[in-house]
Image (cartoon, rainbow, N blue to C red):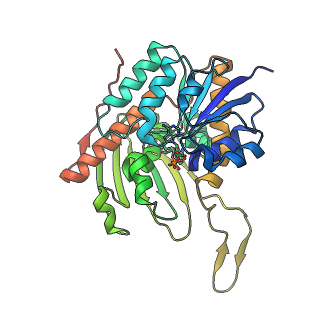
Amino acid sequence: MKRINVGIIGLGRAGQMHLHNLMTIPEIHIVQVADVFIEKISTELNDLGITNQTRDYHDILNNPDIDTVFVFTSTDTHEEIVTAAANAGKNIFCEKPLSMNTVEEASVNVLRAVKKNHVKLQMGFNRRMDPQFRNIFENVRQGEIGTPQVVKITSRDPDLLPHDLIQRIGGLLFDFTMHDFDMARYMMNSNIAEVYAKGGTLIDPTLKDINDIDTLALVLQFENGAYGVIDNSRRAVYGYDQRVEVFGSEGMLKAENVSESTVELYTDKSKIMKKPLPMFVQRYRNAYINEMKAFVNSILNDEPVVASGQDVIMAQRAAIAAQKSLETGLPQKVDTNFSLD
Ligand SMILES: NC(=O)c1ccc[n+]([C@@H]2O[C@H](COP(=O)([O-])OP(=O)(O)OC[C@H]3O[C@@H](n4cnc5c(N)ncnc54)[C@H](O)[C@@H]3O)[C@@H](O)[C@H]2O)c1
C-alpha cells in the first residue's frame, strides 16, 4: 500500500479532532506532531503511540521523512506556516481560511508560494464532502431539479465562542460564514457576484468590543443569475443547526439536520424528535474523514484537490463584500476574476 508521511501542526480544538480521524486512514503515517503548547497533550499523544513531538513546527518542515503537513493552527498563523511549508516542498492540508486579513493579499501570497513550489494545497472546506450535502451537489449536477434558482443555507452554532478564540481564528463572517459562502458557490456551480448583508449583536452586545457580530442574514446573487439566502446565528438553543436547500426549475433538494436517532415520539400534544448532533465534531465526522481521504487520493494519484486555495479566495471576497455591505447598508459587488500571474 502506498502511504504518505505526515506531520501535524496545531493540536487545539480542530487539530485534536482531526488527529483522531487521520489515525483511521491506513494510507496516513503520522511521523511527527507540533504544537507550541505540546506539553498540555503530551501524555495523551504518548498513549496514542505518537511520541515524536515538538513545540517548533520548523522541526516538521526540516524533517526529510515528512512529505505532507496538516496545518490546524489558529488562523492568524496560516499565512506564515503554509508559506514556509510550501517553500519546504511539502504538500499541505490547511484549515480554512488562509489569513485573518480582510484584504486578500496575504492569501494570494500563500498561493504564489504553493504554485512556485509545485506542491498540493487542500483547504478545509469539509462540508463539500459531507454525505448529505454531497448528495445534493451530485443531484444538482445531474440535472435532477432542472436549473438551480435559489440556494438556502441555515448555519447556526449552539453557543457563543470565547472572545479570545474569535480573535485567533476570526469572527462570524471571516470564520463561520466562510463555510456557507463556499457551500453556496459549490451547490450553485457559480461564483458569488453580489452580496447584501444585515447583521448585528442580538445575543452578546460585548462582541462589538472585538468588532464582531452574532446574527447575520445575507442575500446573494450568483454570476449565473441565480440567488442565495444564508442565515447565521451564534446561539441556537436547540443545538448545531445545519441545513441546506436548493430549489430549481424542476424541483427541490434539501438536507435537514442530522440527529443521533431517527425515532420520533408522537402524542396528542406534540411530536418529539432527537435534537441535532451537538457540534461540528459529531455532525461533520464523516465529512472530515472524507476530505482527508480525498486529499490522500489527490496526492497518491495526482488528482485535483476538492477545495483549493482559489476557493478560499472566492469565499474571502464574499466575506469582504458582506463586511462592506454591513458598514454601508448597501449591496456590494464581488470581483470574480482571479489569476495568480
Ligand atoms: N473546518 C471546520 O469545521 C473547523 C472547525 C474548527 C476550527 N477550524 C479552523 O481550525 C483552525 C484552528 O482552530 P481551533 O478552534 O482548533 O483553534 P485552537 O486555538 O483551539 O487551536 C490552535 C492550536 O494551534 C496551536 N498553535 C498556534 N500557533 C502555533 C504555532 N506557531 N506552531 C504550532 N502550534 C501552534 C495552539 O497552541 C493551539 O493548540 C482555525 O483556522 C479554524 O478556523 C475549522
Residue 247 against residue 58 in the figure, above or below: below
User: Residue 204's spot in the image, x, y percent?
Assistant: 36, 68
Find residue 223 and report its horizontal and vertical position in percent.
35, 34
Quarter of the view holding residue 201: bottom left
**Which residue occupies the foreground of this view, 234 or 100?**
100
What is the quadrant of residue 25 in the picture?
A: top right
Residue 190 visible: no
Q: Quadrant of residue 269?
A: bottom right
Residue 152 appears at what percent x and percent y? Answer: 45, 52
Residue 38 horizontal side relative to residue 219, left or right = right
Q: Residue furthest bottom?
A: 268
Q: Is residue 96 left or right of residue 262?
A: left
* Residue 88 appears anywhere in the view: yes
Quadrant where the C terminus sits is top left
Q: Picture coordinates of residue 271 (x, y %)? A: 65, 77
In the image, 37: left or right of 228?
right
Marker count (numbered): 0
Q: Residue at (62%, 52%) from the top-left corner?
A: 281
Q: Identify the residue shown where x is 36% and y is 58%.
A: 216
What residue do we see at 81% from left, 21% from top?
Answer: 1
* Residue at the farthest left position: 328
The residue at 58%/27% (across/down) is 59
| 63 over 93 or under it: above or below | above
